[in-house]
Image (cartoon, helix red, strand yellow):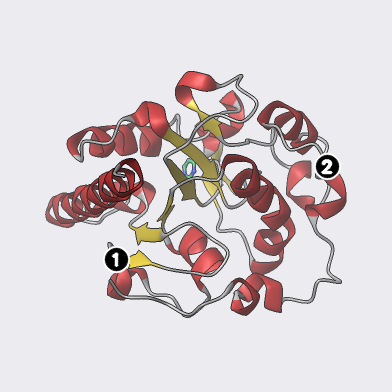
Amino acid sequence: MPTRRATYFRSVFTMTARTKEDAAIYVPAERTLSVLRDAVQKCRGCDLYRYATQAVFGELETERNAAKPKVSIMMIGEQPGDTEDKEGRPFVGPAGRLLDQCLEEAGIDRRNVYVTNTVKHFKWEARGKLRIHKKPNMQEIHACRPWLEAELETLKPRLIVCLGAVAAQSLLGSDFKITQARGKVQQVEGFAPIIATLHPSAILRARTDEDRHRDRHILVVDLSVAARYLSRIKNRTASP
Ligand code: URA
């Protein structure tokens, strides 16, 4: 298994000066999902809250109200999309539906997967009547980091799956390339094992059907790696 010595402290976001504004002062000391979920609505750690309908915190489909639910996998996307922004829940739009199908094909029980995003507010630009996704910048990603850390600390997932470059680079460093290292288990000090793969939105945006089929297959393959890895670590901890 390849190991990657990208430590927490080497991460691009901690290299960004800590003096910059971030969400830390809005994150409550009490680490339960419901407390965090309420508090994130008051976050002013960056300006994105001004243009979003609401903050979208992570969730576990079947245990939305549990304080510290048991989580096997935490999946981290980029930021909520238009549908997620309106509904206040992560991965409930087209990308979420594709993710659900791929999880099923990979044999991962969606009920044990906590889904969240690197950035909790939708960043967009107007194109006519449409709100078009705009990639968050480094400062916004850095600002939102305390919420992601709070989720990781509260849930202690056994495996982290980063969907797309924004999530992957936030945990694995800015030089991490999905195309080169996707689908491989990465060990980073201070985190559960991490597997990075394609973002379902990128698959939906593929230019040709051929590209879309190929990328969808890649996502299923990488999620299958995650499923096998998880069952191996579960078996290891279960055996005497
Ligand atoms: N894309 C993401 O990264 N996250 C969502 O919640 C929806 C789309």
Which of 192/19 is in front? Answer: 192
Which of 49/38 is in front? Answer: 38
Q: Quadrant of residue 227?
A: top left
Q: Quadrant of residue 13?
A: bottom right
In the image, residue 51 sits, relative to residue 18, either above or below, namely above
Question: Which tag, 2 or 1, sits closer to the chain's start?
Answer: 2
| Mark 1 C-beta to ligand 1 under 8 Å | no
How many residues crowd mark 1 within 10 Å: few (<14), some (14–19), many (20+)? some
SS class of the residue under badge 2?
A: loop
Asked whether the residues under the numbered discs 2 and 1 touch, taking CB atoms below 8 Å apart as contact, a structural biologist would say: no
- Looking at the image, residue 221 sits to the left or right of residue 169; the answer is left
Q: Which mark is residue 205?
A: none
Which of 133/108 is in front? Answer: 108
Question: Label 2, on which residue?
Answer: 29
Residue 122: image x %, image y %?
A: 62, 43
What's the CA distance linking mark 2 and mark 1? 34 Å
Quadrant that contains the C terminus: top left
Q: Residue at x 42, y 40 (%)?
A: 72
Q: Residue at x 37, y 60 (%)?
A: 196
- Looking at the image, residue 160 sits to the left or right of residue 183; the answer is right
- Looking at the image, residue 117 sits to the left or right of residue 109; the answer is right
Q: Is residue 171 visible?
A: yes
Residue 39: image x %, image y %?
A: 79, 34
Question: Label 1, on which residue?
Answer: 184
- Type of residue at label 2? Ala
